Amino acid sequence: MGGNIYYLSNAIGVDSNDSLFLRSGFSSSYGKLGYNANVSHSNSSESATIGLNYKFDNVNTNLTVTKNDNGTQILGSANGGILFTPHTGAILSNDTSNTLAIINVKRRSRS
């Protein structure tokens, strides 16, 4: 496994209340675990967010905690794909970006 790559972002600007803002954040991953943190500050508001996601074999999970002027928000989610056939039953996948196809191949009997 190679080294981690960290993504950093920074922004300075003016928000809709004509208030100067500063935003900064980073994200990275280690194997199947991803993580990020972001902070934002202006004269009219402040917020901080941390997030974790994990890619299990059959499902992707996410957890985000945000603290801002309105309080603390905790969000969790899970996503993936489910495929069902009479022969296999339910097949779960964490891949949601590709198209899956089921092909039924019947063998011809030799006479």
Image (cartoon, rainbow, N blue to C red):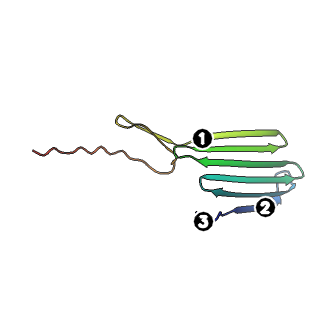
7 left or right of 10 in image: left
Rendered location of residue 15, percent (x, y): 82, 54
Q: CA distance from mark 2 to mark 1?
A: 30 Å
Residue projecting furthest to the bottom: 2
Q: Earlier in the sequence, mark 2 or mark 1?
A: 2
Q: At 80% across and 39% down in the image, what residue appears? A: 72
Dot 1 amino acid type: Ala
23 left or right of 77 in image: right
74 left or right of 54 in image: right
Q: Nearer the viewer, mark 3 or mark 2?
A: 3
Mark 3, residue position? 2
Callout 3 secondary element? loop
Rendered location of residue 3, percent (x, y): 64, 65
Q: Nearer the viewer, mark 3 or mark 1?
A: 3
Dot 3 amino acid type: Gly
Q: Which mark is residue 11?
A: 2
